[in-house]
Image (tube, grey):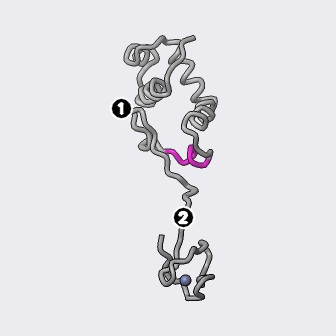
Amino acid sequence: MEKLSLRKQLTIIRLYLSGYSFDEIAAQAGVSKGSVANVIADLKAGRMLIRLLFRLGCRISEVLALKVEDVDFEQGTVTIEHLKARLRLFCPNCNGRLGKTHAFCPRCGGNVDIALT
Ligand SMILES: [Zn+2]
């Protein structure tokens, strides 16, 4: 069985979602019809989810939040919205570090209405 790049697999999925037949997909993507069938079977079985987790190196929540428009099929890229962004918050008065839930600065004791990022 031929080993397909993630980009090639995404091309096959795009063509499949566009309604092309396996024969048309195989011709356009330059792969065998068997390879097209394997990629679509993986997609349906959820193995594509595992592959995306492994290849993209992201969290399952990030993969599950992916939308079709996040995948650039032409460039072969996937835009991941990082759900666990590391926020660094600072006090506007003394520049001390703040936690997300801090209402008062632990350094200067000032009331924190708007923390700086
Ligand atoms: Zn402060």
Q: Crowding near pointer 2: few (<14 within 10 Å), some, many (20+)?
A: few
Q: Residue 106: which quarter of the image?
A: bottom right
Whole-percent x, y for residue 34 in the image: 53, 12
Mark 2: is the Cβ under 8 angstroms from ligand 1? Answer: no
Relative to residue 98, is residue 42 depicted above or below? Answer: above
Q: Residue 24: which quarter of the image?
A: top left
Is 32 within the magenta? no
Mark 1: is the Cβ under 8 angstroms from ligand 1? Answer: no
Q: Which residue is mark 1?
A: 74
At 56% from the left and 88% from the top, the residue drawn is 110
In front here: 20 or 81? 81
Residues drawn in magenta: 61-66
In front here: 89 or 100? 89
At 45% from the left and 13% from the top, the residue drawn is 31
Q: Which residue is mark 2?
A: 87
Name the residue at the bottom extreme: 110
At 57% from the left and 35% from the top, the residue drawn is 52
Residue type at the position of mark 2: Leu
How would you classify the magenta stretch by its main secondary structure?
helix
The quarter of the rendering in which ligand 1 is drawn is bottom right
- First of labels 1, 2 by sequence position: 1
Relative to residue 31, is residue 62 depicted above or below? Answer: below
28 lies left or right of 94: left
